[in-house]
């Protein structure tokens, strides 16, 4: 299993409280944050930022799936990109 070091930009006590959430409350929080990101007006008008946020969300989702023994393969295309963004389990 690969170890990922994640810099935390939130206050440690807040992070600890989130870390200790029950699975149901964690799902509720994720749903709330995902909906807020989708509807955020600043992100709606800045597709580069929206893509950055979406890719960060995918990174965490991929990590969680891999922790459950899943293999992940993702390819994202955008008409303005020269090459698609690709991710595959155990790809460096």
Image (spheres, rainbow, N blue to C red):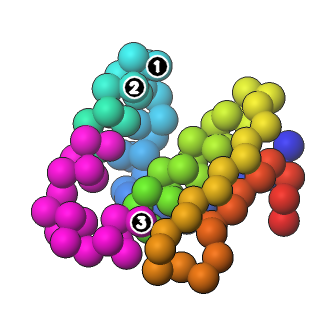
Residue 55's x, y, as percent?
A: 51, 59
**What residue is drawn where x is 54% and y is 79%?**
81
Q: Is residue 55 left or right of residue 62?
A: left
Q: Is residue 48 within the magenta segment?
A: yes
Marks 1 & 3, CB-CB < 8 Å contact:
no
**Residue 76 among those drawn in magenta:** no
| C-alpha separation, residue under disc 1 versus residue under disc 2 | 6 Å
Between 38 and 11, which is closer to the camera in this rendering? 38
Cα gap from disc 3 to disc 2, whole angstroms: 22 Å
Considering the numbered disc 1 on the image, is that residue within a helix, a strand or a loop? helix
- Residue closest to the eye, 83 or 12: 83
The span picked out in magenta is: 34-51
Q: Does residue 5 appear in this view?
A: no
Q: In percent of the image, x 63 and y 67: which residue is there?
A: 85
Do the residues bearing badges 1 and 2 touch, measured as CB atoms within 8 Å?
yes
Circle 1 or circle 2, nearest the eye: 2
């Amino acid at each position: 299993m690969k170890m990922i070091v994640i810099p935390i930009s939130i206050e440690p006590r807040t992070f600890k409280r989130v870390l200790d959430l029950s699975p149901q409350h964690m799902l509720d929080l994720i749903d709330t944050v995902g909906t807020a990101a989708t509807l955020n007006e600043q992100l709606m008008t800045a597709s580069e930022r929206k893509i950055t946020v979406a890719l960060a969300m995918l990174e965490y989702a991929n990590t969680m799936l891999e922790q459950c023994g899943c293999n992940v393969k993702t390819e994202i295309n955008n008409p303005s990109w020269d090459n698609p963004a690709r991710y595959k389990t155990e790809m460096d």
